[in-house]
Amino acid sequence: MKNNSQTGKSSMDGAIVFCDFDGTITQEDVTDQILTQLAHPSWREVEQEWMCGAIGSRECLERQMALVETSAEELHALIDAVPLDPHFAAFYRFTQRRRLDLYVVSDGFDYVIRRVLKRSGVNGPLRNGTHLFASALRLEGRRLVPSFPHSEEPCEHGCATCKAAVMRRFREGHRPVIFVGDGLSDRFALEEADLIFAKRQLLAYCREHGIACHPFETFAKVQEQLEKFLDPGEAKSKVESRKLKARKPRAAVAAFDF
């Protein structure tokens, strides 16, 4: 991320922003809320298998969704009650003004994400789904049936959505890649990121593994930091000191010890 002194532009111009959904755009993990309120309690045993690395997130979600019984009315009421980051809509407008492409990449479900984004005030490609990469979900009777259109085969991690593969596919030339996330399922995306914003479990993971990142609590902080990087004068000293430390060698990420 070098400053272009001739054009007066930061090399962050034209960056691609990839953003997790559950616990990042929303203040709570919507999938966890669905399971807590609507699934048989044995979903927690499946969660522990995922946490200890015995299964990937794809198998985890397949088995957990099979434990849910609900109606459309119950599901919609639950989804509509989940609070969003109060600064996300403003951040979305900021990316539009600065011509930063914003994509949502999530192990969570498009059914849920579309409904939440509808009330968030966003529009354009994020609202219509062309910038959304997530697991799919449909309601059949009282059962939730997942599918995984963005899972890679073979995938060594068994992810429901292979975030790293999506990010590689949309990288154009040497455009900087920014990632914003909060959970352990986001750790595999780090190998494709030039600049990382992390909170909660992802922040703890980055610190444990020596991966440079910017802590944040809300999108107001993410926007504040990006504005500095996008301003050549403000960003210069930070960019020179950072030297793209956010990019971690693939082996360091893949070798996560559960």
Image (cartoon, rainbow, N blue to C red):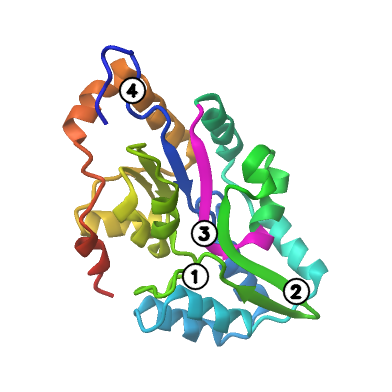
Which residue is disc 4 drawn over? 10
Report, in whole angstroms, how far the alpha carbon at label 1 lies from the one at label 2. Answer: 18 Å
Q: Earlier in the sequence, mark 1 or mark 4?
A: 4
Work out how far the residue at label 2 is from the one at label 3, CA to CA, in angstroms: 19 Å
Mark 2 near mark 3, Cβ–Cβ under 8 Å? no
Instruction: Give the percent coordinates (x, y) of residue 9.
Output: 35, 18
Q: Earlier in the sequence, mark 3 or mark 1?
A: 3
Question: Label 1 to label 4, Cα distance in Å?
Answer: 35 Å
Helix, strand or loop under label 1: loop
- Highlighted magenta segment, given as a residue range: 99-112
Mark 2 or mark 3: which comes first in sequence? 3
| Disc 4/disc 3 C-alpha distance (Å) | 29 Å
- Residue 246: x and y in percent read 26, 45
The 10 Å Cα crowd at callout 2, few under 14, some 14 to 19, many 20 or more, is some
* Lower position in the chain sequence, tag 4 or tag 3: 4
Q: For residue 115, what is the image quadrant? A: bottom right
Whole-Å distance between the Cαs marked 3 and 1? 8 Å
Mark 4 vs 3: CB contact within 8 A = no
Q: Which mark is residue 20?
A: none
